């Protein structure tokens, strides 16, 4: 068993990773609650944004502009998909809606692999200006990017929670989560509320993509399918609670990184999100009621 | 539901095959004979290897088709199941001198047991949650496989020896050591698996699955043990996929965990949906899309990424407009095109009475 000293640096990186998982998770939950779509292209959209930022920076665009562009692209793609396919699939089963986003994932993934070829072997990386500078807590070096990652997770969770609770748009989204048809009858502009949710989710996807590209790797495959890990936190929250998503994300991020120095388990640390999600789902679903929603038909 | 009653009553009377069915059976038999006898002679080794992969993945796709199309369970982890089957078969082939078919059977059975053990708790979940938990489990299996590696002739339970210089190839059956012979062998195995699925669909489990897919409460009310039949479907799909894994192990000779990434399960679901989950032909179409087209494009020097984009578009198209996939849509569209052309050719003749296309 390694000593406490070995674990210390991994607490920081684990919290940062957890923060980004929380950021992704909150985006996924908000969209799911408003539209019933589990957006599996979240990672792909973020990866596209990050790669565009990389290309722009290489072409000499100032940093802040490229980051803005990356978030804008992610938001635009997400919104576009939502407007094109959202209404067509609105009455289908949540499973069908989720599988449809796999379609978008594959399109984006193919496109990225085509445009930013990885076979050349050149490694790309995005560096945020916050990487180099930092401070230290005791013995541990902390970069500002890590701080931003955790802070973004915290701030967005709180902000989204407040938004859903206190604003008119947020209330409309919560109403749609309960019943789309009745909400529409009450005079809520359903399509517009959905579009807002898509846009918000896209912005979060872009931000998560940038942060993950910096913290993990700038690689289309990795980033696209990293959404599978972020999904774990969302699943534990049963696609509903933002708070649970946040806590689960932090726990998963922490546990994942804390396993790194443990020799016997370090190879298995990537299993953390899957195992936690699987166990949690099985425990949470003990009391299932057979129900058939009208939308399943 | 009057529709189901109508469909059920001729099924009872169908002890003797009707004329269109006979024709269809004859065409299928002729096609199979051509694939078994003619095709290996016409193709280069490159395409023979590719077609062996097609046979393997058609089995995986037919297993997934049973889950998705017949029972309505979406699994996003079939490639991980395939990897388990391949692992078990490789381990058995290195450790024992058992005949190859026996190893295939054992690989299928062991995979089935593992699939059932994993599926048992997961089956309490439904719909989206079930799909996601299979994805989570597939992710976990992939990580384990990356660590324990595939057997390469080493000793011990895992059979992996990282310091081996001469890695022995995974053996093939003695009657099918050459590539064309092994291709025929895989096609025969695939035919057996398809027959197994067909036997299920035409009998009691198939009817129970259809009822479950329509409505679980109604199936329950009709006295169908939902849990049991769902598990049965899971077991059947795992068995077939395990056998496919065994065939794959013999086909490629060397297995690496990097060949079974989690995302392949997602792509596989996409092509299976594109091929069509309601017919067995859909599985063949899916396997051709998944294995043959990339090889073809590779030969032509076109990037396989175009194909991935095509799969993405295909999934969206299938989900929005053609739920039965290409296997259903292409013949229907061809028939429609044929009618259209015929109508154009004899324009002078009075327009034939054309009802709805359904």
Image (tube, coloured by chain):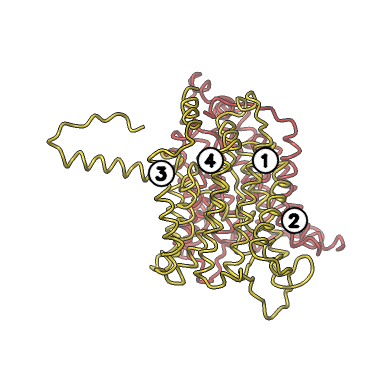
Q: Is residue A14 left or right of residue B188?
A: right
- Parent chain of label 1: B
Circles 1 and 2: CB atoms closer than 8 Å = no
Circle 3 or circle 1, nearest the eye: 3
| Place of residue A48 in the rendered image (x, y in percent of width and height, measured from the top left) | 50, 54
**To which residue does mark 1 refer?**
B231
| Place of residue B232 in the rendered image (x, y in percent of width and height, measured from the top left) | 66, 41
| Residue found at x 72% / y 50% | B113
What is the secondary structure assignment of the residue under circle 3?
helix
Residue that protrudes farthest toward the front in the picture: B16
| Residue found at x 44% / y 34% | A88
Residue B69 - label: 4
Please state which of residues A104 and B135 is positioned toward the viewer in this rendering.
B135
C-alpha separation, residue under disc 4 versus residue under disc 3: 25 Å
**To which residue does mark 2 refer?**
A12
- Parent chain of label 3: B
Q: Is residue A106 above or below residue A82?
A: below
Q: Tell me whether marks 1 and 4 sit on the same chain.
A: yes
Residue B72 showing in the rendered view = yes
């Amino acid at each position: 068993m390694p000593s406490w000293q070995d674990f210390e640096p991994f607490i920081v990186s684990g919290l940062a990773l957890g923060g980004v998982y929380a950021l992704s998770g909150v985006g996924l939950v908000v969209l799911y609650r408003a539209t019933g779509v589990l957006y599996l292209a979240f990672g792909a959209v973020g990866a596209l944004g990050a790669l565009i930022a990389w290309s722009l920076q290489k072409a000499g665009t100032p940093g802040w502009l490229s980051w803005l562009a990356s978030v804008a692209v992610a938001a635009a793609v997400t919104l576009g998909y939502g407007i094109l396919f959202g209404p067509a699939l609105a009455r289908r089963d949540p499973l069908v809606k989720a599988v449809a986003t796999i379609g978008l994932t594959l399109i984006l993934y193919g496109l990225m692999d085509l445009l930013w070829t990885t076979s050349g072997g050149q490694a790309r990386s995005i560096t945020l200006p916050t990487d180099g500078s930092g401070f230290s807590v005791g013995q541990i070096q902390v970069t500002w990017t890590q701080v931003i990652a955790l802070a973004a997770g915290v701030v967005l969770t709180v902000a989204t929670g407040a938004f859903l609770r206190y604003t008119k748009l947020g209330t409309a989204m919560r109403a749609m989560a309960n019943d789309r048809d009745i909400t529409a009858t009450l005079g809520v502009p359903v399509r517009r509320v959905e579009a807002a949710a898509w846009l918000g989710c896209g912005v979060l996807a872009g931000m998560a993509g940038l942060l993950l590209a910096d913290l993990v790797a700038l690689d289309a495959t990795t980033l696209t399918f990293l959404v599978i890990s972020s999904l774990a936190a969302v699943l534990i929250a049963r696609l509903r609670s933002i708070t649970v998503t946040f806590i689960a994300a932090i726990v998963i991020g922490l546990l994942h990184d804390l396993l790194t120095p443990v020799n016997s388990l370090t190879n298995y640390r990537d299993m953390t999100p899957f195992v936690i999600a699987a166990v949690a789902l099985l425990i949470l679903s003990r009391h299932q009621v057979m129900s058939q929603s009208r939308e399943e038909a | 539901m009057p529709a189901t009653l109508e469909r059920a009553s001729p099924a009872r009377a169908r002890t003797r095959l009707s004329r269109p069915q006979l024709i269809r059976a004859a065409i299928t038999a002729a096609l199979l004979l051509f694939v078994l006898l003619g095709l290996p002679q016409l193709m280069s080794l490159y395409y023979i290897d590719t077609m062996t992969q097609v046979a393997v993945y058609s089995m995986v796709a037919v297993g997934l088709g049973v889950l998705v199309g017949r029972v309505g369970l979406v699994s996003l982890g079939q490639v991980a199941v395939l990897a388990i089957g391949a692992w078990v078969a490789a381990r058995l082939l290195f450790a024992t001198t058992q005949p190859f078919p026996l190893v295939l059977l054992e690989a299928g059975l062991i995979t089935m047991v593992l699939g059932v053990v994993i599926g048992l708790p997961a089956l309490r979940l439904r719909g989206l949650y079930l799909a996601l938990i299979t994805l989570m489990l597939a992710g976990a299996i992939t990580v384990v496989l990356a660590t324990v590696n595939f057997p390469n002739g080493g000793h011990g339970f895992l059979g992996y020896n990282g310091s081996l210089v001469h890695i022995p190839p995974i053996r093939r059956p003695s009657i099918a050591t050459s590539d064309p012979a092994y291709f025929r062998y895989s096609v025969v195995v695939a035919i057996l698996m398809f027959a197994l699925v067909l036997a299920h669909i035409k009998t009691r489990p198939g009817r129970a699955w259809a009822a479950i897919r329509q409505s679980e409460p109604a199936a329950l009310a009709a006295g169908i043990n939902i849990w049991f039949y769902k598990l049965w479907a899971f077991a059947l799909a795992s068995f077939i996929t395990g056998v496919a894994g065994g065939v794959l192990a013999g086909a490629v000779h060397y297995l690496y965990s990097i060949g079974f990434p989690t995302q392949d399960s997602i792509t596989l679901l996409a092509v299976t949906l594109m091929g069509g989950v309601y017919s067995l032909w859909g599985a063949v179409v899916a396997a051709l899309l998944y294995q043959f087209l990339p090889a073809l494009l590779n030969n032509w020097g076109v990037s396989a990424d175009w194909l991935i984009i095509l799969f993405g578009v295909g999934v969206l198209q299938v989900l929005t407009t053609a739920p039965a996939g290409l296997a259903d849509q292409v013949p229907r569209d061809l028939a429609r095109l044929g009618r259209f052309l015929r109508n154009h050719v004899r324009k002078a003749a009075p327009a034939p009475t054309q009802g709805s296309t359904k």
